[in-house]
Amino acid sequence: MREQRYLSFLVIIYFLLFLPATSIRAQEVEHEREFDYALKSEKGPRMWGKLKKEWDACNKGEMQSPIDLSNERVRIIRKPEKRNYKLCNATVKNRGHDISLQWHGDAGSVLINGTEYPLQQAHWHSPSEHTVNGRRYAMEMHMVHLNENATNKIAVIGVLYKFGKPDKFLSKLIRNISSMIDKKDEVKNAGMINPREIKIGSRKYYRYLGSLTVPPCTEGVIWSIKKKVRTISRDQVKLLREAVHDYAASNARPMQPLNKRPVYLMAPGATV
Ligand SMILES: [Zn+2]
């Protein structure tokens, strides 16, 4: 009798203690997912602009990214691009919708039309967001630069990858990324990393004015997509996909209308 009472006491304690915790945790998980990439989802790319007022541009903007970079529509310009990156302490962060490498301090900058844009972070999308002549690649890396005082505050350098040999820079981060699979907001110190080690390839690149490809889809972003397509291994793509949450395993925003924006091919000093 006494044992029975003790047992029901334990059962009551269990429900009091653990049930509320479970439901709070469920809410947190729901809350974490601000947007996703499933086309038919109520938080999918077509709905982003309706989820928050500040995300208006995702649906109403007229210079959104990504776009298709077609050879037919590019205008060729000879202009050098100057990058001056520095060794700087960095961390790897699982942002839920992607894996991001963030520099803390002065990691150097890129010079665009006389304006310096300091490097903030890099992250990966799979498959690629931009396409070239309609072709979508295995992966796209974005190096995000920010200058709060400039008219166009954000400048992103994009690099496209097809399947092939592993990317050496990403190989360095494998241990950190493997340790944060499906763990949103997990941060790991990556030590001192020189952004110069990111192999970008040729000096030719596509240039156009677009937007961030995630909410709030801010416009006025200066895009530079490198023409040279680099390689990444299937295992590396698989790892980056596993590391993010299920709703972002494929984290490429669908193509956006060009709306008569000019796209340039910058080819400093060389014949295209
Ligand atoms: Zn991006």
Image: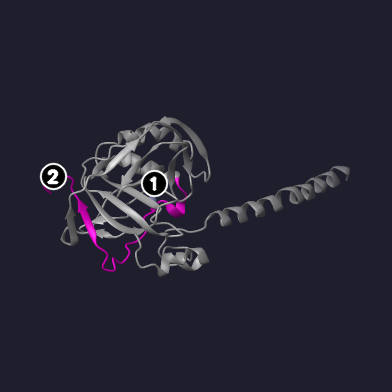
- At a point 74% along the width and 51% down the height, the residue shown is 15
Label 2: which secondary element:
loop
- Near-viewer residue (104 or 182): 104
The mark total stands at 2
Q: Is 266 part of what is drawn in magenta? A: yes
Q: Which residue is mark 1?
A: 145
Tell which residue pokes out farthest to the right in this image. 2
Comes first in the chain, label 1 or label 2: 1
Instruction: Count residues near mark 1 (Cα–Cα under 10 Å), then give few for <14, some for 14-19, many for 20+.
Output: many
Quick check: 8 left or right of 27? Answer: right
Report the magenta residues as a range: 244-272
Task: Please name the amino acid that badge 2 sits on.
Answer: Ala
Residue 190 position by quadrant: top left
- At a point 74% along the width and 48% down the height, the residue shown is 17
Residue 111 visible within the image? yes
Quick check: 20 left or right of 177? Answer: right
Q: Which residue is mark 2?
A: 270
